[in-house]
Image (cartoon, rainbow, N blue to C red):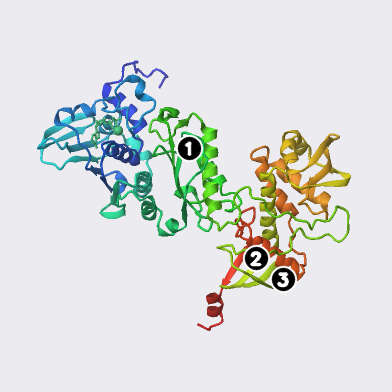
């Protein structure tokens, strides 16, 4: 066959155009559920019931008790661009309702058989209308409760290509479940339920209590691990609310990390990154918190027109909003870890540093002060050390093993952060400047990193093509093996580029300054370390998010020894 197989250019028939356009809005069963539920929410419903069969392919039904559609307008609702939600044309920005384009119902109708039974409160009887392939096939008065029942059958029956492209009914159903979960989290004042193939999968009470909704959607374990966001001092016009999990709870993926903008669930990577960033040093790489966060913004600053299904939005002041979310989460986590020190309160500063070069390097630990009982951190009695790596201690609940490097890293990290907050990290001037050789790729990044490094207490200058001359380092760094520590620190920091440099550098500095595993410790040193760990804001994890201690509970020991 030649390239011209006899097909003339022609105008596509309107029903085909409709199908193609519908494909944008209605890509899969979950898209139908999304559009129908949004309509129910816009209709002011207090209860929304979703029912699906075979992942939505056989049936999708959304039942609401909202305002209904007057009989005389029902047909119009299926016309493209027919909407009751916009008054003037410039209204498309700054929308307050979920729908506004008037595309959903006609799009669904074009690719399925849809029946709407609807009655507004002021009408005695309702009306039932059925469309197939976009055409009205039946319409009649119908007895109906106030509200709307939308039933979609045979989705994509006239689009075999689309059908083939779908995942298994189980996978499509799972997407619907996740979606309905998001709605339930965004609207705790609405009672949602989801039934799949006759099984009730989820139902919320709609009492307006978000934590209740979280327990239903994420489960009790998550709900119990959560703290509420109560941001203080955020930017004006940015209202952040919600709940986030404490670090003992985590998931292997972001499935329980829901971010909403004006109660619309959005796939907004910078916002999600702002949340996970707040857990840096608290959760290991590859672990994610549970969170439900709503960011309330002036609708005029949110452009929802960038994505046909409105899943992505563009924010006018994205960086500011992300920073505010980060701060709100951070505040909630710090406020709830049994903290002694508020942000910015100075950590006690070590005295115990030896001048570089002097023998008999002391540990950068303070002597214990009057013990401050930190809720959430047990009072521990040091028993000894094993493998020159772990401190064995006794506490109220049993036995504890403390990783000396991880614990010290946490202590140094928090102390250094506190110094940074006060913008005066302690500095040690080196008697003789050190020349540190770097890889050329690392050396190239030095100019960009210089100001952050200076803020931390480093003084360095370029030296030849790929080396730096180090004149001063933060006092935190022990002089023992200083050149190796500086080199390892600089390589690690520069390798990561300029992204969040200061924070990463603080973690690296703590790590490369902390006690190494393999170092024998004196009893007082261990006591001092444990004491200081107990005074940390977040004593349970090191700066990389790994645990600092293991608890071997009394009951476990008893079980293991057959005493119980
Ligand atoms: P949009 O939501 O963008 O306005 P739709 O095609 O989704 O467009 O719906 C068209 C119109 O039908 C809506 O503007 C609304 O007036 C009406 N409508 C749709 N679903 C419902 C419902 N569940 N309850 C009340 N009215 C509805
Ligand atoms: Mg709509």
Return the residue nearer the eye: 185 or 152.
185
Precedes in sequence: disc 3 or disc 1: 1
Residue tagged 3: 385
Return the residue nearer the eye: 31 or 36.
36
Q: Splitting the image into four quadrants, where does ligand 2 fall?
A: top left
User: Would you say the residues marked 2 and 1 are in contact, meaning their CB atoms lie under 8 Å apart?
Assistant: no
Let me know if residue 295 appears in the view: yes
Return the residue nearer the eye: 6 or 478.
478
Residue 499 position, x and y percent, is 64, 38
Q: Which mark is residue 371?
A: 2
Q: Which mark is residue 268?
A: 1
What kind of element bears circle 3? strand
Q: Residues within 10 Å of mark 2 (few under 14, many from 20)?
A: few
Precedes in sequence: disc 2 or disc 3: 2
- The response on whether ligand 2 sits within 8 Å of label 2 is no
Residue 252 position, x and y percent, is 51, 53
Between the C-alphas of marks 3 and 1, the distance is 47 Å
């Amino acid at each position: 066959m030649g390239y011209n197989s006899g097909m003339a250019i022609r105008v596509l028939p309107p029903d085909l155009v409709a199908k193609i356009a519908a494909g944008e809005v209605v890509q899969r069963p979950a898209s139908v559920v999304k559009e129908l539920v949004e309509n129910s929410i816009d209709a002011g419903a207090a209860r929304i019931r979703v029912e699906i069969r075979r992942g939505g392919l056989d049936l999708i039904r959304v039942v609401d008790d909202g305002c209904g559609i007057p009989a005389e307008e029902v047909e119009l609702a299926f016309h493209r661009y027919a909407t009751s939600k916009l008054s003037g044309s410039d209204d498309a920005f700054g929308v307050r309702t979920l729908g506004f384009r008037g595309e959903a119902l006609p799009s669904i109708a074009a690719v399925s058989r849809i029946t709407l039974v609807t009655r507004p409160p002021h009408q005695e009887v309702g009306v039932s209308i059925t469309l197939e392939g976009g055409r009205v096939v039946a319409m009649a008065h119908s007895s109906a409760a106030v509200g709307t029942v939308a039933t979609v059958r045979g989705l994509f029956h006239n689009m075999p290509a689309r059908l083939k492209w779908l995942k298994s009914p189980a996978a499509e159903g799972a997407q619907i479940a996740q979606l309905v979960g998001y709605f339930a989290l965004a609207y705790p004042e609405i009672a949602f339920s989801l039934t799949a193939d006759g099984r009730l999968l989820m139902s919320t009470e709609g009492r307006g209590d978000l934590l209740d909704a979280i327990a239903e959607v994420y489960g009790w374990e998550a709900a119990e691990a959560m703290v509420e966001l109560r941001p203080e001092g955020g930017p004006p016009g940015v209202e952040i609310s919600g709940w986030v999990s404490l670090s003992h709870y985590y998931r292997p993926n972001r499935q329980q990390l829901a971010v909403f903008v004006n109660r619309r669930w959005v796939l907004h990577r910078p916002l999600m990154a702002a949340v996970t960033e707040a857990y840096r040093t608290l959760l290991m790489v590859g672990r994610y918190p549970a969170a439900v966060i709503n960011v309330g913004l002036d609708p005029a600053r949110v452009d929802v027109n960038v994505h046909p299904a409105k899943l992505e939005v563009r924010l006018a002041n994205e960086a500011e909003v992300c920073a505010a979310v980060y701060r709100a989460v951070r505040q909630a986590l710090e406020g709830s870890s049994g903290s002694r020190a508020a942000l910015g309160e100075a950590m006690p500063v070590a005295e115990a540093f030896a001048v570089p070069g002097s023998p008999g390097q002391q540990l950068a630990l303070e002597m214990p002060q009057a013990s401050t009982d930190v809720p959430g951190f047990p009072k521990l009695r040091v028993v000894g050390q094993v493998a020159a790596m772990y401190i064995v201690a006794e506490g109220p609940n049993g036995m504890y093993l403390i990783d000396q490097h991880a614990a010290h890293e946490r202590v140094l990290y928090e102390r250094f952060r506190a110094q940074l907050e006060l913008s005066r990290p302690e500095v040690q001037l080196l008697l003789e400047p050190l020349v540190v050789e770097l890889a050329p790729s690392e050396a190239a990044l030095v100019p960009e990193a210089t100001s952050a490094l200076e803020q931390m207490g480093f003084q360095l200058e370029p030296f030849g093509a790929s080396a730096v001359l180090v004149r001063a380092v933060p006092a935190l760094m022990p002089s023992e093996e200083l050149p190796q520590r500086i080199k390892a620190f600089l390589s690690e920091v520069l390798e990561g580029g300029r992204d969040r440099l200061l924070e990463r550098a603080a973690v690296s500095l703590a790590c490369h300054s902390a006690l190494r595993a393999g170092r024998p410790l004196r009893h007082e040193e261990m006591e001092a370390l444990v004491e200081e760990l107990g005074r940390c804001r977040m004593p349970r994890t090191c700066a990389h998010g790994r645990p600092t201690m293991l608890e071997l509970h009394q009951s476990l020991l008893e079980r293991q020894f057959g005493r119980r």
